[in-house]
Image (cartoon, rainbow, N blue to C red):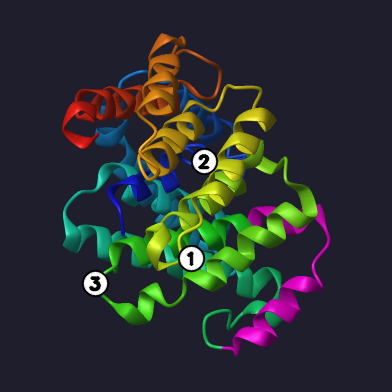
Amino acid sequence: MTAGFRWLAIACAVFAASGCASFVSGAAESLSRAMLDHDDPATVAAAAPAYLLMVDSLITSDPDDEDLLRQGATLYAAYAGVFVDDPVRAKRLSARAFDYGRRAMCEYHEELCRAREMPYEQFTAQLAALDDEDDLPFLMALAQSWLIWVRANADDWNAVADLPRAEALLETVLRIDETYADGSAHVYLGMLKTVRPPALGGKPEEARRHFEQAIRLSGGANLGAKVALAENYARVVFDRELHDALLRDVLAEPSKAEGQTLMNVLAQQRAQELLSSANDYF
């Protein structure tokens, strides 16, 4: 799995899809908003574990609450994907995220409780029956946590073999409402289309269409999608002009934006790293 898979967490709204932390008190909701609006990732990284433990305690008190489980999956997936570099910790925390994501789906939609174990044809048939916008947060939470878990276990081919199931979840999100969470599912799918090089079945042009659609759906505000387009498309096809133009555009944008400041700062950090290494890459 490429280093760019870190953006599976960043580009798709750090620390949750829409409505993060609405599952608890107004104080916790304010805390989530403060984290998203913060411009110093190191501060957020230091504070996040205490917040995660609070989520754990809430789930322990009400282990069958589908919304608590869903938010726990999203929060742990984002934290493990963005801030955890140690492979052992990444495996441990992503496993918790995936566990919460699967349990959330079990509580919400019993037929998908065995999403990983059931035959693939049965799995996709269950997904085909979904058509309600209320399904979207659960589909995204399971997809996010599943992908971060696969990334952490990229040395296990049994885990990597799960990627088509995560892709099917994301395709279902797009079928129901591609605008959900500013088109986050498009960014994830773009990543998946470039996991493998073109010679081994990668589909960079399909990836480009997904990234560009995410950018359009966000009105250009999704800086993470622009970075993903540069890193996971322009680099793959060796388009230096597009690569540098996208990254310079990201760096020229203001980072402060309601609900997206943290994501934008992280995107700009990655953009600078990619620009700095461009001469060595191209």
Q: Mark 1 points at which residue?
A: 100
Task: From the image, tell me which residue sits under label 3.
Answer: 155
Q: Earlier in the sequence, mark 3 or mark 1?
A: 1
Q: Is residue 33 above or below residue 7?
A: above
Mark 2 and mark 1 in contact (Cβ < 8 Å)?
Answer: no
Q: Is residue 261 above or below residue 178?
A: above
Q: In this view, does 66 lie to the left or right of 90?
A: right
Amino acid bearing label 1: Tyr
Q: Which amino acid does label 3 sit on?
A: Asp
Task: Point out the tag, 1 or 2, that comes first from the N-terminus.
Answer: 2
Q: Left or right: 124 with respect to 165?
A: right
Q: Mark 2 points at which residue?
A: 12
Give the distance between the C-alpha atoms of the residues marked 3 and 1, in whole angstroms.
22 Å
Tag 2 secondary structure: loop
| Residue 257 part of the magenta segment | no
The magenta region covers 118-138
Residue drawn where x is 69% and y is 32% of the image: 217
Q: In which quarter of the image is residue 87?
A: bottom left
Instruction: Give the vertical position of 209 relative to 203 (above or below).
Output: above
Dividing the picture into quadrants, the one containing residue 40 is top left
Q: Residue at x 56, y 57 (%)?
A: 141
Q: Where is residue 131 in the image (x, y as percent from the top left)?
A: 83, 62
